């Protein structure tokens, strides 16, 4: 009973310590943590033992601030304490590294991606059985780095990370989140050939999942985000690829067919249709851009009126259509759609369909292309 009471008291003390630590600003929390370490050094029998979770709390606080150098320094302190041997329970773990990686990515400091890569390499070095397996990077860490690279526009490094995850030493396999991160990087880049590369990755995923279907391949099942991202890659490639809009719409049709066959995870939504309309507006194809945009919008209208709320047209949809009408020099359709937007907004007050600056700019483009004096 005495032992149980002592354990309960210790647990309560630790809980209160961690609760107070979370309430403090990061630097004050670090000071309190270091004070605890010092007290334990002086009188280990009667002092609170510093725990890995204590360091996690402070590292998370630094990560939220983007205080990368402070987080890195604290991780180094953990390594030092663990290396002394007296603090064998303080070995850095995945959660500690993950917080420091977050801090570097939030910091945006020059060279932060190199710092992240160094930390990841350090973690991968722990893959050896003789090293700290508790610090081996997991799927969550790899995906976090991929999305950080995608956000930074580091296309080649994001793609390389896929192969890095697949290596035998990582003991991980890429999942759909990994692939979606790389696809996002490709779409965001807008570089020549990026859309084709994105579609090749999509085809690889389709083969992995649909043609070699097994429970193991469920983790690479392409989803709505996957297809929408590849469509977006084509929309952003119109200046390089003369058939980019056709390729984007072909993907949309494939999604429709797959959904009709029972695949609920790729049901096209407003983003799917709007992005294809946007592709036509950027295609420069005067002969068909307006026609295709109008047909896609009518399809969305019909489905929405039939109860499919996932394809409700919004201001982005209407504006993309107006830009397509400008390409095809079709002021009649453009003015009718512009008036429709105004009527809908005035009747409902719904901000999703409120004409924006981009909407008015699209109409100015329509009138400029028409050559009309009125």
Image (cartoon, rainbow, N blue to C red):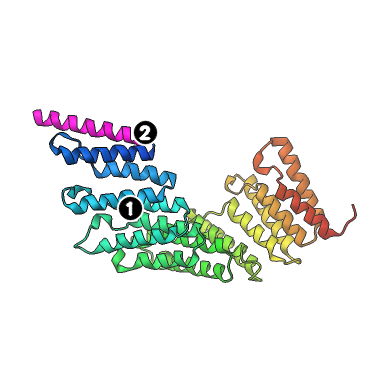
Q: Is residue 254 visible?
A: no
Decide whether residue 12 is among the magenta residues: yes
Q: Residues within 10 Å of mark 1 (few under 14, many from 20)?
A: many
Decide whether residue 321 is among the magenta residues: no
Secondary structure of the residue carrying tag 1 is helix
Q: Is residue 148 above or below residue 243?
A: above
Q: Residue under circle 1?
A: 97
Callout count: 2
Q: Is residue 315 visible?
A: yes
Q: Which mark is residue 124?
A: none
Q: Residue at x 68, y 53 (%)?
A: 297
Q: Residue at x 22, y 49 (%)?
A: 81
Secondary structure of the residue carrying tag 2 is helix
Q: Residue at x 42, y 53 (%)?
A: 104
Image spot of residue 289 (x, y percent): 72, 63
- Do callouts 1 and 2 mark residues in contact (Cβ within 8 Å)? no
Q: Which mark is residue 23?
A: 2
Q: Is residue 60 above or below residue 1?
A: below
The answer to whether 346 appears left or right of 6 in the picture is right
Read off the magenta span. Answer: 2-23
Mark sitting earlier along the chain (1/2): 2
Residue placed most toward the observer, 250 or 123: 123
Residue placed most toward the observer, 116 or 134: 116
User: Magenta segment, principal secondary structure?
Assistant: helix
The answer to whether 163 appears left or right of 277 in the picture is left
Q: Residue at x 56, y 58 (%)?
A: 256
Q: Quadrant of residue 59?
A: top left
Q: Quadrant of residue 230?
A: bottom right
Cα gap from disc 1 to disc 2, whole angstroms: 22 Å
Image spot of residue 184 (x, y percent): 51, 59
Image spot of residue 2 (x, y percent): 9, 28
């Amino acid at each position: 009973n005495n032992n149980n009471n002592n354990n309960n008291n210790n647990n309560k003390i630790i809980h209160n310590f961690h609760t107070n630590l979370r309430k403090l600003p990061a630097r004050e929390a670090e000071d309190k943590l270091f004070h605890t370490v010092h007290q334990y050094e002086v009188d280990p029998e009667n002092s609170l033992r510093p725990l890995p979770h204590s360091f996690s709390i402070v590292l998370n606080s630094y990560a939220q601030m983007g205080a990368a150098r402070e987080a890195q320094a604290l991780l180094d302190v953990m390594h030092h304490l663990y290396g002394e041997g007296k603090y064998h329970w303080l070995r850095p773990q995945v959660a500690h590294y993950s917080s420091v990686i977050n801090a570097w990515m939030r910091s945006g400091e020059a060279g932060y991606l190199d710092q992240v890569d160094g930390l990841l390499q350090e973690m991968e070095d722990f893959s050896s059985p003789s090293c700290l397996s508790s610090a081996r990077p997991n799927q969550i860490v790899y995906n976090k780095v991929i999305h950080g690279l995608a956000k930074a526009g580091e296309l080649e490094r994001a793609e390389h990370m896929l192969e890095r995850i697949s290596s035998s030493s990582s003991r991980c396999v890429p999942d759909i989140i990994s692939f979606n991160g790389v696809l996002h990087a490709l779409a965001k880049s807008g570089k020549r050939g990026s859309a084709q590369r994105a579609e090749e990755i999509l085809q690889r995923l389709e083969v992995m999942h649909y043609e070699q279907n097994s429970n193991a391949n469920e983790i690479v099942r392409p989803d709505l985000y996957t297809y929408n991202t590849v469509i977006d890659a084509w929309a952003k490639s119109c200046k390089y690829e003369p058939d980019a809009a056709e390729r984007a719409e072909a993907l949309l049709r494939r999604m429709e067919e797959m959904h009709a066959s029972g695949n609920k995870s790729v049901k096209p939504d407003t983003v799917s249709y709007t992005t294809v309309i946007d592709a036509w507006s950027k295609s420069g194809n005067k002969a068909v851009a307006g026609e295709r945009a109008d047909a896609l919008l009518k399809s969305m209208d019909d489905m929405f009126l039939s109860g499919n709320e996932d394809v409700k047209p919004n201001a982005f949809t209407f504006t993309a259509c107006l830009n397509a009408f400008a390409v095809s020099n079709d002021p009649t359709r453009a003015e009718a759609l512009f008036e429709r937007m105004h009527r809908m907004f005035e009747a409902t007050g719904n901000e999703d369909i409120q004409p924006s600056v981009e909407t008015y700019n699209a109409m100015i483009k329509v009138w400029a292309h028409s050559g009309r004096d009125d």
